[in-house]
Each structure stands twice: as C-alpha cells, then as structure tokens.
Amino acid sequence: MNLFTDLHAQPLIEDWFAQRRWSPFPFQQETWAAYRGGGSGLLHAPTGQGKTYAVWLGPVMQWIEAHPNRDTWATIDAPPLQVLWLTPLRALAADTTAALQAPIRDLGIPWTVERRTGDVSSSVKARQNKRLPSTLVTTPESLSLLISRPNAEELFGDLQAVIVDEWHELLGSKRGTQTELCLAWLRRRRPNLRTWGLSATLGNLDVALDALVGVPTPGTPRQTHLITGHTPKEIVIDSLIPAEIERFPWAGHLGLKMLPAVIAAIEEGESCLVFTNTRNQAETWYQAILDAMPDWAGLIALHHGSLDPQVREWVEDGLRRGLLRCVVATSSLDLGVDFSPVDRVLQIGSPKGVARLLQRAGRSGHRPGAVSRVTCVPTHAFELIEVAAARTAAQAGAIEGRTPPQKPLDVLVQHLVTLALGGGFRYEEALAEVRSTYAFRNLTDAEWDWALGFVVTGGDALTSYPEYQRVVAKVDEDAYDDANHDYAQGWAGPRYMVEDRKVAQRHRLNVGTIVGEVTVQVQYVNGGKLGSVDEYFISRLQPGDRFIFAGRTLEFVNLREMTAYVRKAKSNRGAIPRWMGSRMPLSTALAVAVRAKLEAAANGIFEEDELRAVAPILAMQAAGSYIPRQDELLIEEVETDEGHHLFFYPFEGRLVHEGMAALFAYRLSRLRPITFSMAVNDYGLNLLSPDPIPLAEVLAGKGTPPLFSTENLFEDIPASLNAAEMARRQFREIAQIAGLVATGLPGQRVKSKHLQASSNLFFDVFSRYDAENMLLSQAHREVLEEQLEQSRMAQALDRIGQARIVVMQLRRPSPLSFPLLVDRMREELSSESLADRVRKMQIAMGLEA
DNA sequence: GACCTGCTGCGGAATG
C-alpha cells in the first residue's frame, strides 16, 4: 500500500491491515505525514470512514520509529501516558479502548490502553491517580478531574498527543469550553503536544480547528492541518410519499397516517432504525408498530434518553448482534456504538437540520465504501418541502456550523477551582493560558479579575460565607525580602490554591457542565428500574392512573423520594408522558434551503418527487394567497370568528419567530393600545386580536421604530417578553456550573426542588446586593442568544428590511396559515378530536369540495 | 377509542 515506505514498521502495519482485509484510507498518509511533521489538526469525514485508526497510527508509528529493534519490545516496560483520547460518551470510551487495544496487542507493542470514566471502579482510578496508562481513553469531565489532582503535572509529564473524538459534538456546548480550557492547560505544560480532532463535516471547520488547537500566541508558531476524508461517501435521501396528498394532514407531528408505509419499509430490510424527534413520539410509534404487527414482539425495541441505561444497553447489544428487526429511537442513537447490521434508517418528521439528517443517514451503511440511506417520513404535507430542501443542501455541502460559547464565566470559575486544586496557579501564567483558548481569547482584564475574585472572596454578596472562599492566595515563604521591605524581584505573585478538604471534595463532585431537568425515577414496586420522566408529569397523576412508558402500560402506585413506583397495568390504555425538552428550531441552513424550494415552486419548477407531491397544495396557496420568493416577505390578513389575524412568514425557525411575534406585537401596540395572542411555528407567526390591527399604518412608516427595524431590538425584546423570568431559569444552570449549588453525591441527589430554590435565592441575593455580578449578566446574555437566537433574529430582520413586503388580504385562511391556526386550537380544544376538526377545516376550505 | 411535540450528555475518594 506504500503508505510508509521509508519506515521499517511498514510491513508490520501492512500485515495488520491485510489480516483484516482492510484497504488503507486515502487520508491516512496525509494524516501520518502531518503528524510526523509535528503538526496538529482536524480530520473531518462522515462516520464509518475509519478515522479512528488513521489518527491512532500517528503516535503508534512514532513509538515504533523510536524503538526500531523489535526483539527488545518484550523487555520494555509500558511507558507512562503517551496519548490521551477524549470522547463525549462513556459507551464510546469503552468501545474505543477495545479498538485501540487490538493493534497494540497484535503488533506486540508494550503499551497499556485503559479507559477512565465515572463508571470505572475506584480501585482502578486510585491506581491511575498514581500513574496513567500509555493511552488513556476518557471524557472531558474525567480529564478535568485528573487535572484537579495535586500531582497533575507529573501525570501528564510524558504526553505526546491528545486526540479528541467527535469534536463536533462538544464544540458548540459548554462541555466544549471545558475541553478547550483543559487542552490549554495541557499545551502549556507540553509545548510540543500534538492535538488531533476527529469530526463530522461542519459549516465552520475553521472555527472548529481554532477551538481545538487554541489561538496562536506570540512566539509559539503553530502548524495546523485541516484534512478532509475524501473517500466519497454516498448518501441517499428519499421519502415515503403519501398516496393521496389531498387526504394527508396539513398539520400535526405524529405522522401515524404513514404507519402502513413505514411497516412495509421495515419489512424490506433486515434491520432498521426508526428515528423520531421526541421521546413521546418514539413511545407512540413503538406502540403503533407493535399493535399493527403483534408478531414482532421481541424483535422491535425502544431507545431514548429517559430509559434506564441497562434497558438501553440491552437494545444496543441486540442491534449489534443483529437480533432486532427494528429500533424506534431519538437522538440517543445518533452517536456512538457502531451497529453494522443496520441497513435501513427511517426519519419520522422533519430532521430540522442538514447535519442531523446526514448523521442519522450515517447510522446505516456504517462501513468504508458502503452506501448510507435515510428515508424521510412526513408527518404533514409541508414537511415534504423540508426533505427536498435538506437533500439539496446536503448535496451542496451547506451544512450547519456549531458555534462555541463565548466567554462563559461559569465554566471559567469552575476551571479556576480545578486549577487551584491541581497544584495551584499564578496570575499571569494562568491568564495567558486561559486567553489561549478560542472561547476566552477576548477575555478582558476586568472579567478575569472578577472571576478570580469570585473564587477567592465569593464576590460582594458572599464575602461572609467561608464555603464560597474556595481559593486562597498563598505567598511563598521566601518571596518577601525583609531587608528591602518588598517582594523579591521577578516574583510571580501568590500561588492560588485550595486548602480546605471539604471545598476540594465538593468541587470534584460537581465537575462538569451538564445540568439536567427535574426528573423522577420510574421503578417497579418490586425493584426493576425503567428510567425517568419529568417530575411535572408524575405530579399530575393519582395513584391508580395509567401511563405508557418504556413501551409498557404502567399503573402509578406512589411517589417516594424522587422515585415513582409503578406496577404493570392490566389494560393497555394510558397517557404517554411528555417531557419538557428543549425546542429544536429549523436550522439556518435548512431554512435557507426551504425558502429556495418555495421560490422554485413559485416559478413552477418541481424537480423532486416530494415537491411534485405537494404541488396541489402549493397551487392552492398560490391561488388563494401567494407563494413568497426568497427576496420577499409574505404577510396575510384574515378576519375569522376568532378575530383579526396577521400571519407573517419569515421561515426562520420557531425560536426566532417567538421573539419576532413578541417584538411585532409590542411595536404594533405602541401605535395604538391593542392586545394580541400569538402562535408560532418554524415557518411563520400569527398575531390575533379582537380589534383591527393597524398594519398598513405601521408599514407606511408610522410608529418608531419601524416594525422590522433592528434599532432598539434588545430593549424592545425584553420589554415584550418576560426576559427577567427567563434569565432566572437560565441562572439555574450557571449557578450549578459555577459551583454555587451542590448537587449532592451521585446516586443520592439533592432534590431538584432544593436546587431550583437555592439557585433562585442566589439570583435574588446577587440582584440585590451584588448587581455587578458577572454571572447575572451572563444569564441575560444566554437567554438572548440561546433562547431567542438574537443574532439570527437581527440578521433575519435585516433581510426582511431589504425584502419586498407582499400583503395579501384573504377571505379565508391559506394552507400555509393552517398549522398556525391548528396550533392555537390545540390549546382550546376539549371535546372534539383535533384530527376531526382539522379534517373538517380542510373540507370547508374547499380542498375536497 | 385515545393520542395531538420538543434531544443528548457527565460526574468522588478519604477513612475506618
């Protein structure tokens, strides 16, 4: 294969590949050359392309080169830590450890490969605390914990390379920030450290690379590489098209109308993954499939994040061994273990993003060279447009980026305590180290001083509480020169350390940035654990009530100490729990693609099967109202029994529309007092008022600022939404990450109500006595950016400001407005079934005259 | 004959 012809190790590696009948991947040579040159980099490719072994060869070959005499290997002791391998998942850590051990064992290299995650026994951890294996596979959280060891510098003293697997998964979250800070710590101690990231393809690979290797500092030039896996990966995206679009719903999300087609698709393959967007939807579909195909009991399974880990492991194992015909899952199966037998992937409902759809497609054909295929199943008619848009975007490589959080001070505060535990730190050195990360490259002196002061004194409000004075500034004994009454020349300042053992223990228990929801465990009265559901769902149940969870019908018995005890119910009717998850708006990349597809349709171009299928409904939209082009904004005015409606269609995703609805309502009401009720979805927003709405006046320029202006945006949004309450909720996460609120020991958690109560208390105390507290302003910033997507909203308003505004006065609602109307009915509807009502409305609107 | 949105992920160790 001529990969490494100048190396004596070549035949060894060649044989090893040949034994597995693997051909080398084209990017292996490139990766190896870059590694050998001392460089760092990011290797991006779809899953199933063999990235793992491509980067693993680097450090292994380097060792072989340094130890040419193979006969001596058996007499050499395993070296201390050479390679650190980070993964975002415990399950992946276990799999990777096994994968890396194989070539080490086969080649006879004297290396130890071990993992370290929370589930590793404490005796193994204790041994590792003294000396790390030659390769350590671990998570960002466990790496932080290692850095908090007093002997941390020693433990990492021989490290050659760090490899970050699935970097795209960490990049956009505070877990990524935590990783950035730890990598900066490693780089300062090992200046020649090579950092390699493995990632799926992203829209902002340059940012991903910068965040991985850190920003260049003066005097330390760096050599970085962005390597593309250029094995072409064929990905097929198709749809199950409803036979009669006229009888297909215009709204709704469950999609059970497609059940027969889905069952036929499952029957076609050997082993099938059915992805849904929510846990409730996964449970519903699992029941529906089982009801339709009772013979499949035992051959189909359910997998989502609220199921007990043991249940999930059983399912994953069944998939790997090819024992399961079908698994209905949420994002919990997006990532991780390789299920080679899977040959069919279905996606129920819109994937909401291009990257997400590609990720799910990649769960089938998970081998180099194999074709990946995903079949989308629409739950309402307009979703067909989204599928066609997603396919075009994927082919064009228009994939979403992931933006790293900027300066999250809660993560910095936590990291400072970690550093203080790990042998301590000094002001200037630590500041330079933190600023070498992408996340904190623009950290101001004031922000740094505030964060440092916060861990030393607890800030203005907490100075009299010793438990919040976590870090002490220790002055070296010989630093003070008594003769000169001054500190010695060149003294680097005090060393910041943790001295209190309780502070140390509490900190180690709280390392990490993942803050969960308020949930209660679900367990059989006689012991078997099923998983967890949101507390608010359980709190509404009476003993004897039934609900469906983990694919079973359960009877609620009682609630004790955050555990809901249940028994099997005799009847199989019951409510399916709904979780308070986060909301997934249509991604920016997909929103752009959808607008382009609509423009094509407006111009009479229907290239894809999906678009041809919705053509009759789009024709109704065009006849009754209008199909907006990309440079237009459609506004519909309709009067119904409910009152006066305005519908806006920016196609920017529901989070942006939520902010816009509040903003528009606020600005319209400033012209004349008027009250609105609002509804939003991914396509648009609806304002409803009992009184006529002065739209024409506002569009004509009356009122300040104009409706679509970005001027005063950040004043007008908080005024129109309950931003203060949102910040209070956001602060719960910040308080926990910054170490203000302890979560208790694993396994015996502090009750979440207490957590919420005390984070509320901190919020109030800071607001009153420490208004300059930077964690408070961070909470407000995070609400604007994450809950309201403020930058996306500003861009959207700019775009709309340039757009031609098309106002249509309608006698009855258009197809596009339909889902927004249904959304409102959902809340009001009691006796009549929603589906019936939707059907009647469709008929009333003349679709089936 | 009821159902009618909202994902994922981690984590301790000293003492008897």
Image: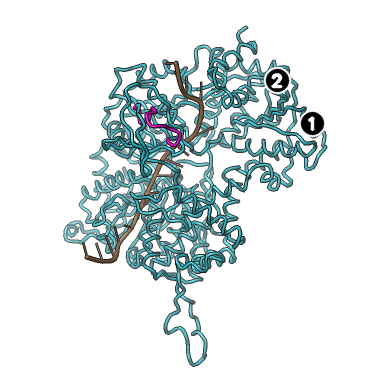
Chain colours: A cyan, B brown
A549 drawn magenta: yes
Which one is nearer the viewer's eye here, A510 or A572? A572
Q: Would you say residue A230 is visible in this rendering? A: no
Residue A694: which numbered mark, if any? 1
Residue drawn at 37 percent across, 20 percent down: A289
Circles 1 and 2, Cβ within 8 Å, touching? The answer is no
Q: Position of residue A275 (x, y in %)?
A: 42, 29
Is residue A668 magenta-colored? Answer: no
Under mark 1, the amino acid is Pro
In this rendering, the answer to whether A827 lies above or below A786 is: above
Graded by Cα atoms within 10 Å as few (under 14), some (14 to 19) or many (20 or more), the crowding at tag 1 reads some
Helix, strand or loop at mark 2: strand
Residue A15 in picture, x, y percent from top left: 23, 44
Q: Which mark is residue A383?
A: none
Q: Position of residue A844 (x, y in %)?
A: 64, 11
Magenta residue span: A538-552
| Mark pair 1, 2: CA separation | 17 Å
Instruction: Give the residue pinned by disc 2.
Output: A640
Residue displayed at 30% across by 20% down: A296
The kind of residue on which mark 2 rests is Thr
Image-based side of A110 in relation to A465, left or right: left
Front in this rendered view, residue A73 or A208: A208
